[in-house]
Amino acid sequence: GAVVSQHPSWVICKSGTSVKIECRSLDFQATTMFWYRQFPKQSLMLMATSNEGSKATYEQGVEKDKFLINHASLTLSTLTVTSAHPEDSSFYICSAKDRGPLEQYFGPGTRLTVT
Amino acid sequence: AQSVTQPDIHITVSEGASLELRCNYSYGATPYLFWYVQSPGQGLQLLLKYFSGDTLVQGIKGFEAEFKRSQSSFNLRKPSVHWSDAAEYFCAVGARGGADGLTFGKGTHLIIQP
């Protein structure tokens, strides 16, 4: 149980285009989802927290107009990187939790390369 | 704000030898502590977690960790490493009962010598 999927697993896009990444909880209802970013050989940095039906809360320094997060249902959150640039190339990982357990369940990650 | 320090960027251990990865945290209240492992290009796998109770926690793959409040530490140990343990290891702290995102350390890269 407690499986989180991400789609796509990797994506290449051209500079200036937008890319949408999906995060799904497959066997539980995720009241809260988190989006992290990981640069090569570095740690994970929390970007934002989204609660179902509410606006996402962004960490300091994260551009909310660039990284659009939607948590429209209890099993799906999306991250859209708008007008992507090469510096947005990174590994994006989501996690999800429901009301009960304290533990977050991580997705496998999405590698974004902007050319 | 909470923070996590993993003082060792790289550690090299011979196969079959014991392992200890260090983790120190800074948090004003009761921390929720985690160790994750990440293989190249992969997501995170939870090794073990500490929420409360017994300060020595057992995890998967033969790993264990000990929470020491007086030292603000949560070191990861394994009595005998295998070549398949080579990976990146992250210590993380969570707050407010898990309602917030996690704060991760910078990670320790474990290399296994044959």
Image: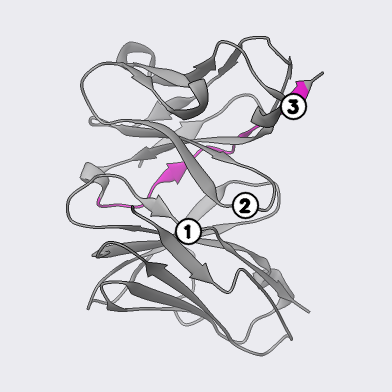
Dividing the picture into quadrants, the one containing residue A35 is bottom left
Q: Amino acid at mark 1?
A: Gly
- The answer to whether A21 is drawn above or below residue B69 in the figure is below
- Residue A12: x percent and y percent? 72, 78
* Residue at which label 2 appears: B42
Whether marks 2 and 1 lie on the same chain:
no
Q: CA distance from mark 1 to mark 3?
A: 25 Å
Q: Residue placed at 35% from the left, 75% from the top?
A: A76
- Give the chain letter at badge 1: A
* Residue at which label 1 appears: A107
* Residue at which label 3 appears: B111
B100 falls in the magenta region: yes
Q: Which mark is residue B55?
A: none
- Residue B99: x percent and y percent? 25, 52
Dividing the picture into quadrants, the one containing residue B96 is top left
Task: Please indicate whether residue A94 sits to the left or right of residue B96 in the image.
Answer: right
Q: Amino acid at mark 2?
A: Gln
Number of disc labels: 3
* Marks 1 and 3 in Cβ contact (< 8 Å): no
Question: Seen from this angle, which residue lies furthest right?
Answer: B114
Q: Residue placed at 39% from the left, 47% from the top?
A: B102
Residue A68 seen in the figure: yes
- The answer to whether A59 is drawn above or below residue B17 in the figure is below
Whether marks 3 and 2 lie on the same chain:
yes
In the rendered image, the quadrant that contains the C terminus of chain A is: bottom right
A111 falls in the magenta region: no
Camera-nearest residue between B79 and B102: B79
- Residue B86: x percent and y percent? 69, 31
Q: Say which element carries label 3.
A: strand
Q: CA distance from mark 2 to mark 1?
A: 10 Å
Question: Seen from this angle, which residue lies furthest bottom?
Answer: A17
Q: Residues within 10 Å of mark 1 (few under 14, many from 20)?
A: many
